[in-house]
Image (cartoon, grey):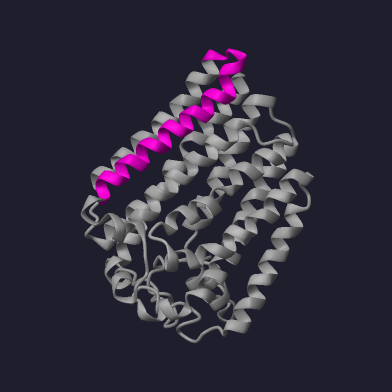
Amino acid sequence: MTEPPQIPEAAPADAVADAPKGNWVDLFAPAVTRPYLRLSRADRPIGTWLLLIPCLWAIALAGGVSGFRWWDLWLVVSCGVGAFLMRGAGCTWNDITDREFDAAVTRTRSRPIPSGQVTVRGALVWMVVQALLAAGILFTYNWLAVALGVASLALVAIYPFAKRFTWWPQVFLGLAFNWGALLAWAAHAGEVPVAALFLYAAGIAWTLYYDTIYAHQDREDDALIGVKSTARLFGAQSRRWLWGFFAATLVLFAAAVIMAHADEGRVLALVVALGGVWAMGWHIQWQMQKLDLDDPASCLAVFRANRDAGLIPVPFLAVAAWLG
């Protein structure tokens, strides 16, 4: 006799509507912690990955310039933990400032603050706790990295308000989300060379690409409540703009790689590193073939696929650094 099929465990009644089904917060976290973990987006790790990946790029590429040290193992681990904490603090701040907008949008009205699971005061306390834990990690770095980390708080604070005064809030997200490229390079090398600036610019272009796709999920609701975004700005021309952001990402990333490796004449290392950029480009081209901007599910799936796209260059850059 065959066993009856297993019925998946239902999500809790207080689950956030757009969180992945069966995520660890819904299934395993103690009930009292769930609203706070959801504020931090712990139920959807994609944002942590997108914050961490520019750090990994920088560590691997900087290693090609000055070589790897045991300290870099701590940088990788601490950047991962720091990305989780600062992404959580930033999302908490975003939900505090956007609570009225979130209550008016179908996809976000089930979030902890608009649904009444967490008070604004409770959210503020939780945000401070996360930021202080992240600061404990930051202060293990050199003073240039510490200064850059403190400076990033201005971008984090401004971003939630950008959609109120500009059609380009994705630029502010890019400035904040890719700051780790500068910070991690500084933590590794004690300086921020021109290659790091080009890497930072590549990350911003990449963010414009993936967050414009993400914003297409909400363009109708955003139009009703007056929230600005590149998705609304570009409208029917969005695919053309996405191809432009894609091209800018690859050109700027390649420029950063060339600046990091070409001075020493390390041809093989340069070829391997550029191979990683090409492979990332191949993946994004595949995304564009799959993308349907009129289908929110397609937009979300392609947005999440950028974790894989961003991770692809990392082993190439690390091998190139070893070859150098």
> Image point 73% across, 53% down: which residue?
138
Q: Position of residue 228 (x, y in %)?
A: 37, 65
> Image point 49% across, 68% down: which residue?
161
- Relative vertical location of residue 94 with respect to residue 278 in this rendering, above or below: below
Image quadrant where one finds the N terminus: bottom left
Classify residue 88 as left or right of residue 280.
right
Near-viewer residue (2 or 228)? 228
- Relative vertical location of residue 126 with respect to residue 158 in this rendering, above or below: below
The image quadrant that residue 119 belongs to is: bottom right
Classify residue 307 as left or right of residue 83.
left
Q: Magenta: predominant secondary structure element? A: helix
On the question of residue 288 being in view, the answer is: yes
Residue 239 part of the magenta-drawn span: yes
Residue 219 part of the magenta-drawn span: no
Image quadrant where one finds the C terminus: top right
Q: Position of residue 45 (x, y in %)?
A: 50, 59
Query: How many circles with numbers are drawn on the protein?
Result: 0
Which range of residues does the magenta coloring cover? Answer: 238-267
Q: Position of residue 187 (x, y in %)?
A: 71, 41
Near-viewer residue (180 or 321)? 180
> Image point 78% across, 49% down: which residue?
140
Q: Position of residue 286 (x, y in %)?
A: 29, 40
Near-viewer residue (209 or 271)? 209
On the question of residue 287 being in view, the answer is: no
